[in-house]
Image (cartoon, helix red, strand yellow):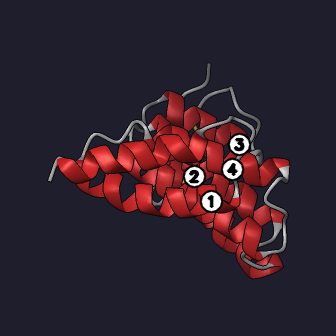
Amino acid sequence: PGSGAVTGADLVLTAPGPVAGDPHAVIAAAVRSGRHGDADAFAARHERAAAQAHGPASEDALHWAEVRADLAMFAGDPVRSCRSWLTVAEARLGAGQLPQAPAVEAAVDRAHHQWGRIRDAGPARELGAALAALRGRVPGRREGALDHVQRELSRLQTQG
């Protein structure tokens, strides 16, 4: 496995490993090295460039938003990951993708999974309300997903 070093704001490979020019390999190397912030910053630059070149709801821009949602998960930040997946799902729906489209369902399912990992009641309530609204439009293939969110939200409300 290759190792990396950070020079300024850019990721620079210092040993054999990822192929230069493959941003996914650069990001993977950063994650393996525990440099989650560097990985996210690198992906954010790609997301901004794709949004400027093709529009914020383009497949390329949404791909980088999904990469960032996964990076938040790898960094142990379920709040940021959930919020990112919710944003991706809303962007896909806003771009005219159908609620049953695989990419839309996957984004909502991933948001739901990350929401279940949030331990702080405040963000769990906030994101749970957004997730419940989205689940109303995108029920997904797992029966009872909306009911699950609503039950958990009720439980969170009683926690204060």
**Along the line of sight, the residue nearer the viewer: 106 or 38:** 106
**Along the line of sight, the residue nearer the viewer: 158 or 124:** 158
Q: Which residue is mark 3?
A: 24
Q: Residues within 10 Å of mark 4 (few under 14, many from 20)?
A: some
Q: Quadrant of the N terminus?
A: top right
Name the front one of labels 4 and 2: 4
Res 68 label: 2
Residue shown at 61% from the left, 29% from the top:
15
Looking at the picture, which amino acid does disc 4 mark?
Answer: Pro
Report if the CB atoms under discs 3 and 1 are less than 8 Å apart.
no
Q: Which residue is mark 4?
A: 139
Question: Residue 97, position in %: x, y?
Answer: 84, 66
Residue shown at 83% from the left, 47% from the top:
102
Horizontal side of 12 relative to 99 (left or right) equals: left
SS category of the residue bearing label 1: helix
Residue shown at 45% from the left, 49% from the top:
150
Q: Is residue 6 something that shows in the picture?
A: no
Number of residue marks: 4
Q: CA distance from mark 2 to mark 3?
A: 11 Å
Q: CA distance from mark 1 to mark 4?
A: 6 Å
SS category of the residue bearing label 2: helix
Question: Residue 58, position in %: x, y?
Answer: 81, 70
